Amino acid sequence: MLHRIFNKQHFSTLFEHVGVGIIVVNEFGEIEAANKYVFREFGYEEQELLKKHVESLIPERYREKHIR
C-alpha cells in the first residue's frame, strides 16, 4: 500500500512540476487531465480543455496523420 501511495504522490509532483505540458487521454481520445503548462501553451482554462478530443489541439494539417 505504501508503495502505491508513494507512486501516486510522485506522479502528481512530476505531473505538475516537470516543466513541460503533459496531457492524459482516455481510450476515446478525450482529455482527462492536463498540467498547467498545457493550459498556458494552448490558452485554455482547465474546464474548457477537459473532455475535448486531443486532436482538437493538433493543427488541422497534421490531424489526419495523428488519427491513424
Image (cartoon, rainbow, N blue to C red):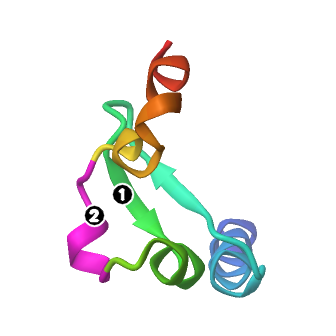
Q: Residues within 10 Å of mark 1 (few under 14, many from 20)?
A: some
Q: Nearer the viewer, mark 2 or mark 1?
A: 2
Mark before the other along the chain sequence, 2 or 1:
1
Residue at horizontal 77%, vertical 79%? 18
Rendered view: 24 above or below 58: below
Q: Is residue 9 left or right of 46 when viewed as pictured? A: right
Q: Which residue is mark 1?
A: 32
The one nearer the camera, 29 or 10, is: 29
Q: Is residue 38 above or below residue 65?
A: below
Mark 2 and mark 1: span between their CA atoms? 6 Å
Q: Residue at x 41, y 36 (%)?
A: 60
User: Is 4 located above or below residue 12 in the figure?
Assistant: above
Q: Quadrant of the N terminus?
A: bottom right
Crowding around mark 2 (Cα neighbors within 10 Å: few <14, some 14 to 19, many 20+) is some
Q: Could you say where residue 9 lies in the image, as x and y percent from the top left?
A: 66, 81
Near-viewer residue (40 or 30): 40
Q: Residue furthest top?
A: 68
User: Looking at numbered disc 2 in the image, what kind of residue is underneath it?
Assistant: Leu
> What's the magenta region?
45-52
Please say whether residue 51 is one of the residues in the magenta stretch. yes
Mark linked to residue 46:
none
The location of residue 2, given as percent across then percent down, is: 71, 75
> Is there CB contact under 8 Å for labels 2 and 1?
yes
User: Mark 2 — residue?
Assistant: 50
Image location (x, y in percent) of residue 20: 73, 73
4 vs 50, left or right, is right
Q: Amino acid at mark 1?
A: Glu
Seen at 45% across and 19% down, the residue is 64
